[in-house]
Amino acid sequence: MKGWMGKIRALFLLSSLALILSGCGRENLTAFLPKGYGAEVSLNLIIISLAVMIFVFIVVMIIYTVVLVKYRRKKGQEDYIPKQTEGNKALEIIWTVIPILLLVIIAVPTVSATFDLADESEKEDTLNIKVTGNQYWWHFSYEDEEIQTSQDLYIPVGKRIYLNMVSSDVLHSFWVPSITGKMDTNPENENTMYIEAYEEGVYWGKCAELCGPSHSLMDFKIVAVSEEEYNQWVTDMQNFDAEAVPETASAQEGQELFQNNCISCHALGSSPVAVAPNLTDFGNRTKIAGVLDFDKETLVGWISNPEEFKEGNKMTNAEYLKNGSLSEEEISKIADYLLQLKPTTITPESATN
């Protein structure tokens, strides 16, 4: 009896834990609250698959219970041999046909969705964005608008946007659970998918392919804004002046230090250089390096020792870190310059408000 009570308690504890954990997570980082066409299609497939699996589980458990009760060994029947059913054609047909039908129920909508989400018939008539996966950050090139950004991808709500994906190094996987499913980025070939956000908002994205020690920190965001705000964002980004003089003396010195130490890797404006993230709208972001709190102290810490926050990132090999050419005060001035890079009033807050 004690053994059974222990098992019951363990089962109750695990069930309670599973129930509690099912409520964890973020609204903008889940496939179960779809805010885009691809995510809605994925959720429908998940529901179909779960329904089939639950049906199979229930049927198996019913048969198991019936057999357990009806054919259990009874007193006085220790040598009793039940009637054998091998060679029963009806049973063999049933347990062959039923699994095939269940697989068809799952396969047909899955194949249909696969072709639907791979449809490129509207590609020439809509916005195309080249997505490049890097260790451990994302770069976005707006192919027809001459805009380069990193980490934050701005799109107009309610529009189909085509993403043409590649990798600059190893395999990565682009995934925004609330908007769409996953798509691998490869060094050898370009993969294409389209996204469409139903509502304005900021949606978190993840790399879903193990790509190195900081794989779990390779986050990014899709910022879906109204079409009017998106057009304003495009205009502001296209008119960005990388040579504009900052207002404060500290930021002005930081601009010069940035030009002398950082511009060989980081780009500003429409420059296609993408050795490191484009920093044009850095001051409008809400995260540093995709995952860190957005404040000056954290930014100074990141510039001073990026390896502490993202193991294996390429900034660790920067010349200013190798030769120690920048003092803490100079790094602070570079941070002042970066924090004032706000070419537009359209920010992630615009989407959430």
Image (tube, grey):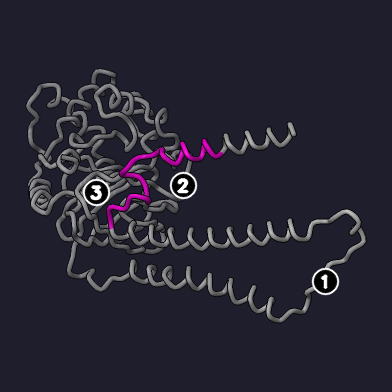
Image quadrant of residue 144? bottom left
Residue 132 horizontal/vertical position (percent): 32, 53
Question: In the shown orientation, is residue 72 left or right of residue 143?
Answer: right
Foreground mark, 3 or 2, reads 3
In the rendered image, residue 289 lying in the magenta stretch gets the answer no
- Rendered position, 230 above or below 290: below
Whole-angstrom CA distance, mark 3 to mark 2, is: 21 Å
* Segment colored magenta: 15-36
- Residue 153 numbered mark, or none: 3
User: Which image quadrant: the N terminus?
Assistant: top right
User: Which image quadrant: the C terminus?
Assistant: top left
Q: Helix, strand or loop at disc 3?
A: strand
* Nearest to the observer: residue 278 or residue 159: 159
Q: Amino acid at mark 2?
A: Cys
Whole-angstrom CA distance, mark 1 to mark 2, is: 57 Å
- Rendered position, 205 above or below 191: above
Q: Residue at x 58, y 58 (%)?
A: 58
Q: Residue at x 30, y 55 (%)?
A: 131
Residue 66 horizontal/vertical position (percent): 69, 60
Which residue lies under the disc numbered 1? 83
Image quadrant of residue 150? top left
**What's the magenta bit mostly, secondary-structure-wise?**
loop
Q: Mark 1 or mark 3, which has the lower sequence index?
A: 1
* Nearest to the observer: residue 162 or residue 45: 45
